[in-house]
């Protein structure tokens, strides 16, 4: 059984690598065509060259640092608020009646729609960018947290109550652990949302960050730099998601669902 | 002492609305301390509803229930319940599930370990202490459920068709084991089932209910000797009780 699982897993990794390799090979093949315009589709060597240049000049690390800071701040603040408010709304009827219509009304508005008003109110400060990411993380996360609390099986609640648990004890010892699969999904979607809004917020009001490097690449027609940053963002988001899944798998060994 | 008295209880869902449905009517019952009682009846006779009300999960629209003279209001640990569905917490190991109740009321680590060891042994799950519920069979999870309720030391045990989802062999083993545990602790048990044989094998007293609205139709005192053995299921006395009660159930 274990051997089979290991085999399946290695097969899965192999297939994943294969799909990336195919895209890679296609890209190399296309850029090697005689009529390819390297200004539009820069060859891999140029992209790697841009990576090395930006790495040695320190601009890449600075940008990465600035962007990661925004991601982490926006993610932590946004999801923390979502967890607190989502648990209350999902568990306490009063909180639900109070906040649910508001959240349902706000939810369909894309976070990027707030960019103009945020810039008017707070300027193109660091705070504005973090705020946009915070909003994005909050909105996608809270929906999942509420769903998780509402999907707590009634029989667990009844079982805990008949063993003498108070309403708050049921909340603490039953509702929250029962909702963790939903909560983790919410956190992972929030992380993805943080990356998507990050670039958008930096494209508009950027002095540094990965979005700024993209913008700079466009302005000076450095296609290789644009490509390089896209790959970096992909790699960062992928790595963070993987780390998240590892944490989830560790914390949720009880759950049947594999990563 | 832990005697439950149900006094002239009537329950109507949606009382005062056009869709009002009376599920229980004029129920008077006494469950003696330390006795094993079963509520039987076809589906719709309100037996589960009655049990849940005794647990305090909701209140009757009329009449009252008392435990040792105190009115039953809301849930508390004196009345433990085993549910028909799987109620084992999947995020806790077998041991942690069993010590859930004691942990709630702040039992010390040593006391928790002690209770875990005792009840894991009592319900026959030795060696599975650190397993996750998903790694257990349905019957084993039911054992966790029963051990968890017992470890919480309630005065009364309410069981709502706990073995309904198990296969015949597992069910018979569980019944014998439950009786063994009950004999050692002498807690009052109120057991809901639609399985007559199960009721006869387990009980001192069987309450047969009729449906729509749920009323008490007959109370049968079972005088089969204890401890009960599987062979008794085939005795004339057992079968004649079964025949008698079977005729009373609405088919």
Image (tube, grey):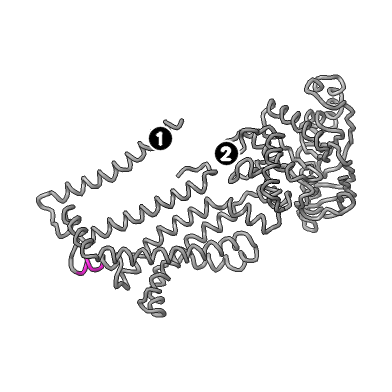
Q: Is residue B174 magenta?
A: no
Residue at 16% x, 53% y is A45
Residue at 58% x, 67% y is A99
Where's residue A134, x and y in %?
A: 44, 67
> Which quadrant of the figure has residue B155?
top right
State if disc 2 and disc 1 touch (CB < 8 Å): no
First to last magenta residue range: A215-219
What SS does tag 1 mark?
helix
- Which residue position is annotated with label 1? A6
Residue in the foreground of this view, choosing between A94 and B115: B115
Res. B134 mark: 2
Image vertical order of residue A19 relative to residue A214, above or below? above
Where's residue B14, x and y in %?
A: 76, 55
List the single residue furthest toward the left: A34
Residue at 48% x, 56% y is A186
Res. B87 mark: none
Where's residue A179, x and y in %?
A: 56, 53
Report if residue A110 is visible in the image.
no
What SS does tag 2 mark?
helix
Report if residue B16 is visible in the image.
yes
List the single residue furthest toward the front: B110
> Which quadrant of the figure has residue B62?
bottom right
Q: Label 1 marks which chain's residue?
A: A
Q: Residues within 10 Å of mark 2 (few under 14, many from 20)?
A: some
Residue in the foreground of this view, choosing between B209 and A186: A186
Instruction: Answer left or right for B50 relative to A182.
Output: right
> Which quadrant of the figure has residue B143?
top right
């Amino acid at each position: 059984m274990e051997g089979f699982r290991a085999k399946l897993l290695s097969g899965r990794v192999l297939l994943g690598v294969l799909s990336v390799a195919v895209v890679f090979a296609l890209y190399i093949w296309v850029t090697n065509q005689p009529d390819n315009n390297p200004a539009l589709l820069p060859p891999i060597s140029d992209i790697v060259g841009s990576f090395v240049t930006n790495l040695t000049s320190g601009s890449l690390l600075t940008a990465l640092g600035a962007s990661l800071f925004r991601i982490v701040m926006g993610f932590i603040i946004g999801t923390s608020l979502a967890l607190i408010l989502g648990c209350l709304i999902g568990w306490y009827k009063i909180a639900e009646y109070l906040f649910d219509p508001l959240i349902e009304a706000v939810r369909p508005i894309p976070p990027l729609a707030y960019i103009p008003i945020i810039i008017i109110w707070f300027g193109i400060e660091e705070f504005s960018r973090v705020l946009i990411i915070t909003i994005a993380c909050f909105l996608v996360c809270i929906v999942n947290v509420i769903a998780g609390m509402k999907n707590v099986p009634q029989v667990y609640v009844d079982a805990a109550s008949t063993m003498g648990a108070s309403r708050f004890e049921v909340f603490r010892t039953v509702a929250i652990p029962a909702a963790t699969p939903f909560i983790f999904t919410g956190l992972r979607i929030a992380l993805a949302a943080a990356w998507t809004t990050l670039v958008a917020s930096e494209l508009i009001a950027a002095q540094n960050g990965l979005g700024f490097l993209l913008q700079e690449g466009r302005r000076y027609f450095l296609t290789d730099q644009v490509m390089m940053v896209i790959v970096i963002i992909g790699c960062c988001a992928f790595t963070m998601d993987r780390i998240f899944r590892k944490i989830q798998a560790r914390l949720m060994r009880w759950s049947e669902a594999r990563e | 002492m832990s005697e439950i008295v149900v006094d002239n209880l009537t329950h109507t869902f949606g009382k005062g609305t056009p869709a009002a449905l009376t599920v229980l009517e004029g129920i008077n019952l006494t469950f003696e301390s330390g006795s094993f009682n079963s509520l039987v009846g076809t589906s719709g006779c309100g037996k589960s509803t009655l049990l849940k009300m005794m647990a305090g999960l909701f209140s009757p629209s009329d009449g009252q229930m008392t435990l040792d003279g105190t009115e039953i209001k809301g849930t508390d640990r004196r009345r433990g319940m085993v549910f028909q569905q799987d109620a084992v917490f999947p995020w806790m190991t077998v041991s942690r599930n069993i010590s859930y109740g004691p942990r709630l009321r702040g039992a010390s680590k040593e006391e928790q370990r002690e209770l875990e060891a005792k009840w894991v042994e009592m319900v026959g799950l030795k060696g599975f202490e650190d397993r996750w519920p998903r790694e257990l069979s349905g019957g084993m999870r039911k054992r966790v459920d029963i051990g968890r309720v017992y470890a919480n030391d309630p005065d009364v045990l309410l069981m709502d068709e706990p073995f309904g989802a198990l296969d015949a062999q597992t069910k018979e083993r569980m019944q014998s084991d439950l009786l063994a545990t009950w004999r050692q602790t002498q807690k009052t048990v109120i057991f809901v089932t639609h399985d007559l044989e199960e009721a006869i094998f387990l009980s001192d007293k069987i309450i047969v209910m009729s449906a729509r609205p749920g009323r008490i139709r007959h109370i049968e005192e079972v005088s089969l000797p204890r401890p009960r053995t599987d062979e008794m299921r085939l005795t004339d006395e057992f079968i004649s009780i079964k025949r008698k009660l079977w005729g009373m159930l609405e088919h």
